[in-house]
Image: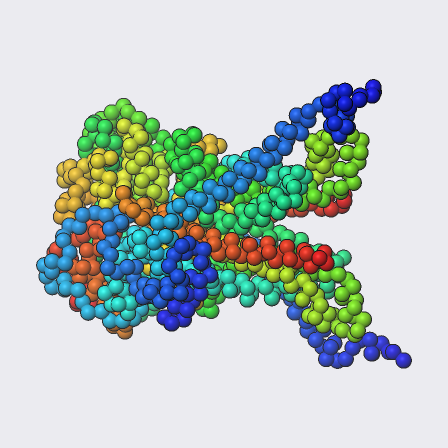
Amino acid sequence: MSLITPGAAGKTAAEVTRSQLTGGKRDTAGLVLLVLLLLCTLTTLLILGVLLQEVLVDAWPIMSERPGDFLTSTIGSDPATTGVWPGLYGSFIIGLGVLVLSVPLGVAAAIYLEDYARHDHKITQLILVNIRNLAGVPAVIYGVLGLTIFGTWLKGITGGSSVISAALTMAVLVLPVVIITSMEAIRAVPQGLREGGYGVGSSRWEVTRDHVIPYAAPGILTGVVLSIARALGEASPLIMLGAITGLLPETTLTGPFTALPMLIYNWSGRPDPVGGDIGWTNAAAAAGLTLLILVIFFNAAAIYLRNRFERTRLGV
Amino acid sequence: MKASTKRLFAGAIVASLVVAACGDDDEESTPETEAPAATEAPAATEPMTSEPMTTEPMTTDGEGGGGAGGETPELASGNVFVTGSSTVEPISIRVGELANELSGGELLVTVEGPGTGDGFQKFCAGEADISDASRPIREEEAQTCADNGIEFVELEVAIDGLSVITNPNNSAIECLDVPGLYALLGPESEGFGSWSDANDLAAEVGAVQSVPFPDAPLVVFGPGEESGTYDSFVEFAIADLSEERLGEDNDFTRADYSSSPNDNLIVEGIESADTSLGWVGYAFFQAEGDRLKGIAVDAGDGCVAPTAETIADGSYPFARSLYIYVSTTAAAENPAVASYVDLYLSDEGIAKVSDAGYVQIPEDRLAATRDAWAAR
Amino acid sequence: MLTIEDLQGNRKQRRAEIVTRRIFQAAALFSILVSLLILFVLGQGTWDFFVGIDWNFDVLTDTGWFPRRERFDLRTIIVGSIVVGSIAMLVAAPLGLGVAIYLAEYAPSKVRAVVKPVIELLAGLPSVVVGFFALKFIAPEVVDRIFDPTQSRNMLVAGLGIGILVIPIMASLSEDSISAVPGSLREASYGVGAKKVTTVTKIVLPAAISGLVAAFIIATSRAIGETMVATMAGGYDGSGPYNGFNPLEPGLTMTAAMTNAAGGTDAVKAGPPFDVLFFVGLLLFFITLGLNTIGARFVARVRQKY
């Protein structure tokens, strides 16, 4: 390699060094790859953007004119005056059901699997594999489960096709997610914290209650919030349970019910009036926007919680 | 849920969805002003101008010329639960909204449409006050009702007509008879790609209208098996011949046609091919009149074109009755049920049949229905 | 003197210990109960279905999916699921992988801080909203314009919609496995003078391959189990003929066949046309279980390696 005087070639020393390190050629392959990766990322972001825009634009005729009325009116036969009140109520109860049912159950299971169970035990292994598999079972199958167990077997308690049945079904559906995220949060609790507890004479339950759960709380909460968002957005179990889309002036726990995803599904399929101003497309989009805002709110909360959680864990 | 808590709840949701209310007036006042709408049918004062399928009402409502029982009744307050046919559901919904509106939110009607069979199951178990039906109740269903001590009255409320349609450019076909339709669309026609393929079968089953069929592509569009209109079509055009020739449980159309859940897609399909063939509900055909050509139908009494008149007077053969079954037990115990049915059968209520896309029953049959209700 | 008794704590503590342990254990065992119930419910319904069709297996190969005619051609719905799932993966695999590589290897931390939450937002989209988007945008504005299909709802539209839903799953699982590749491998690569592109394509991706395969398999399982978009945009409501592998034709997926069977029709909602949903559910359960198990094997391989 001959020595090149920087000044003679009209280049700075840094440029020369760089060109020698990179072999002196322009990195075409690297550029192509980077462009491809950027294209993938931008396409994905673009799809999300177009989707949000489509929902917003279609929802606009209703959401700009009568947002309050839309949220508080009951469902009806006219897209220009229909509301989503029963759907909001149903979705609210479903979210509440998930919170009340799957959180204690999921967190308890996670504590057992992380802190109590012996990991080399066959039954523990079975439970762990089983939970992972349950997390991958399609929602529509949970719908079949809910229809049979809560809609038919336990009809006397749940009232059959009711919002209680829907909430129970969704709680079972998100349980694996709650368990898995809670386990991860509990696993991240420093062992020293537990040992410190034992050292001062606490029992395992006291350590769990006073140290493990509080420390893991933000991580557990992240999973909980994501689970609620998921439960709010699932539609197929609602179809299985027979959520109604006709007329529902009264919202009850054990009577006929509906929820936001069911309304979006049903309204999307209804024909729009010829030449009419506001059609079912608009109503479906407005209901979709309502659901999106709820779900995005929960997801954003989860992202915020997780970031905080990570910072705490890193001791920042 | 009580109105006050609902209002609070609604307020909380509105407040939490500030984003949804983009640039809206201040949200504190929203629950205040919108609260009545939460308990009433959607915007009572507005005329429903954008129905999915509007047809011209056959009788102008509100003229009060309906004879006995035509006046809008006084409405009791309470709850009514209507289940049953998804075909009849749109009528019951509209009458329910009217009831809610006229009673100032006192008469609350819940309507669902799981299907005629499901409806009777619930109805005869005493779980519903009224069951909508697109066919008369079956003997075994009536037996279940009797076993459970549910007494009921059957009320004919509307007519569901259907139109056999083709492309307006198809000048060769003006009228088809039932055997001809069976030859073109019945279970034995599977695989026929040309109208002329059906000629042998048509001759065998005794078709006389428009035979022999032209040698032109036969492209078929219609609603899927899930649709009430499919059931009607099979009942009118296929069932008798399929039972005679193939035995029971073969009352289906051919399987190889483009089925669609959306009437608009059927119309697009019919428009896409000059010699297409299909069927849609009468109301939809009427609304899309210029894009389609209705084929007259001969069920043994000559060709009759589908019009509101021929359907109402019973001369058009492809029309069936829609019913509501009212539990007289429930009606006796719950004045709200009686009120709802009173309203259903009043001039104002029965006018909703047209709004929902069906044909109103003629005066004499309406009078018979009212008499049946009065004599319960 | 400290005795064992002292170390065991007082009686109250011990009783609480036993009770809580039992409660936690019961909670963990509940998940086993859920699995057993799923199998029992699906199995029982499947039994009813086969009794309903008199164990006549011919109906499972009769042409087309027409529950009311007792024609339950499995080929129709399985091919429907394969076509829709394949299209979804054709969209989601390259896009998801691209996003993952970009985020893991290239994105400056500021860009990453914005893009990653947005992708997670995409993961939170309710499938019914994506179904709406497929019906009202992908069908009329994309597929109709480019391919002009005979019917605007078809398997391509459903597949594209599901693809959107699956991108974030593919992206996040791939990113996890790429990030799991130890930094030392990259440094070694740079150390011998390799360019970034060489390092990524020749070192990092091959090292992460098990995880990427796992991501692909698990995402495929999701795509096949996804219900709403297929029901809304697939083109048939509960019945339809076998249309082969042409994605521009309408079709039924296994999931869409299930929701439609549950909805029933005005005339029929009992017997085999209804019970078939348990049978299809059982098939779907085992298909997704199989895919997830294979996926988990690959994930385990990554864990072992690093």
At x 61%, y 35%, the residue is A37
Image quadrant where residue A38 sits: top right
**In the depicted view, which residue is nearer to us: C172 or B279?**
C172
At x 30%, y 59%, the residue is B42
Q: Quadrant of the N terminus of chain C?
A: bottom right
Residue C272 appears in the figure:
no
Q: Quadrant of the C terminus of chain C?
A: top right
Q: Position of residue B341 (x, y in %)?
A: 23, 64
Q: Position of residue A93 (x, y in %)?
A: 47, 64
The color scheme shown is rainbow
Residue B221 appears in the figure:
yes
How many discs appear? 0
Q: Position of residue A195 (x, y in %)?
A: 79, 66
- Residue A201 lies left or right of residue B144; in this view the side is right
- Residue A291 lies left or right of residue B322; in this view the side is right
Q: Position of residue C261 (x, y in %)?
A: 43, 49
Residue farthest to the front, as pictured: A7
- Residue A182 lies left or right of residue A296; in this view the side is right
Vertical relation: A259 (above or below) B225:
below
At x 72%, y 72%, the residue is A206
Image quadrant where residue C206 sits: top right
Residue farthest to the right, as pictured: C1
**In the depicted view, which residue is nearer to us: C192 or A121?**
C192
**In the depicted view, which residue is nearer to us: C265 or B250?**
C265
